[in-house]
Image (spheres, grey):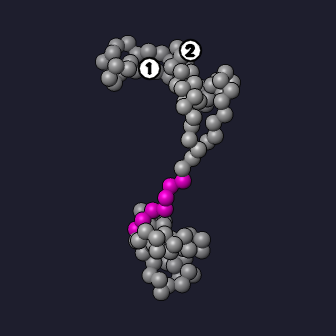
Amino acid sequence: MSKFKLLTLVPESWTIKRAIQEFGGTEHDVKKARKLKNEKGILTDPDSKRGKPLSPEISEHVTEFCKSDEYLRMCPGMKDGTGNIQKRMLLVNLNQLYAECKEKKRIQLTK
């Protein structure tokens, strides 16, 4: 159970200091949990942060790059895959693949 779910159970009569002593966390966490409790009720999680969407052009470039035979090897048999797509085995680790993709396609992805 997440820290914020637990902190939404803290009674309103408790001070912030008492909530910190009983459940741990920081003053900011307690205030955020109280606000969350007022908006959505008890035992709720805060909304997850959404990252920047990836453009379809970049997505297609990365997919095309990753399907190249230089970095992947086809497994022998269609039964190894799912549907009509044959399984492929990665020949390099992901860090090397990312570095090559960045160098060849001039794409910058953030972590």
Question: The disc labelled 1 sits on which kind of residue?
Answer: Arg
Q: Is residue 46 visible?
A: yes
State the extent of the magenta-drawn residues as a range: 43-49
Q: Is residue 35 above or below residue 13?
A: above
- Numbered label attached to residue 20: none
Earlier sequence position, callout 2 versus callout 1: 2
The residue positioned 44% from the left and 81% from the top of the image is 11
The residue positioned 54% from the left and 70% from the top of the image is 32
Residue 44 is covered by the magenta coloring: yes
11 on left or right of 18: left
Residue at which label 2 appears = 70
**Screen quadrant of the N terminus:** bottom left
The residue positioned 48% from the left and 15% from the top of the image is 73
Helix, strand or loop under label 2: loop
Residue 37 is covered by the magenta coloring: no
The residue positioned 34% from the left and 13% from the top of the image is 77
Helix, strand or loop under label 1: strand
